Amino acid sequence: MTEVLAGCRSLTAIWEHTTDLTAADLEALGLPEGQALPSESAIRRVLQDLDPTDLDTHVRSWFCTRTGTIAGRRVIAVDGKTM
């Protein structure tokens, strides 16, 4: 399984990215102020336990709620770009 989250290509890099999140970022994710972030091993266990098909279904569904219309075409913004 290849993990890519916020441009991070390893579980350690994903964990390091979480340590760089600002208080505003954490609040936007719904994490209470002062809550400890998961360790690299916790992130690893969660990702390894995910069912890829189930995850794909949920991510596709979420993306569908983020679509819009530009000039009559259905579009979705991904990572700051519009496809």
Image (tube, grey):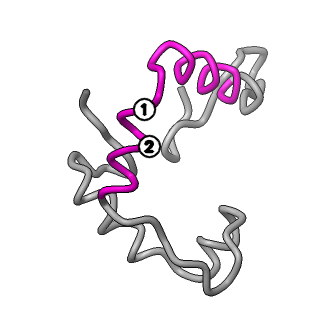
The residue that appears at 28% across and 51% down in the rendered structure is: 8
Q: Above or below — where is 83 with respect to 44?
A: above
Which residue matches tag 2? 46
* Left or right, 66 with reference to 12: right
Determine the residue positioned at 42% across, 68% down.
18
SS under mark 1: helix
How many numbered callouts?
2
Label 1–label 2 contact, CB within 8 A: yes
- Is residue 20 depicted above or below 15 in this figure? below
Q: Position of residue 44 (x, y in %)?
A: 32, 47
In this orientation, which residue lies closer to the viewer: 33 or 72? Answer: 33
- Marks 1/2: CA distance? 5 Å
The magenta-colored residue range is 41-63
71 vs 17: above or below: above
The disc labelled 2 sits on which kind of residue? Val
Could you say where residue 7 lies in the image, as x and y percent from the top left?
Answer: 31, 49
Q: Name the residue tied to disc 1.
A: 49
For the N terminus, the image quarter is: top left
- Residue 2 sits in which quadrant? top left
- How many neighbours does mark 1 have within 10 angstroms: few (below 14), some (14-19), or many (20 or more)? few
- What predominant SS class does the magenta segment belong to? helix
The reply to whether the magenta stretch includes residue 64 is no
Of 58 and 36, the residue lying toward us:
36
x, y percent for residue 4: 32, 41
Q: Amino acid at mark 1?
A: Asp
User: Per the image, is 56 magenta?
Assistant: yes
Q: Residue at x 30, y 68 (%)?
A: 16
**Residue 55 lies in quadrant:** top right
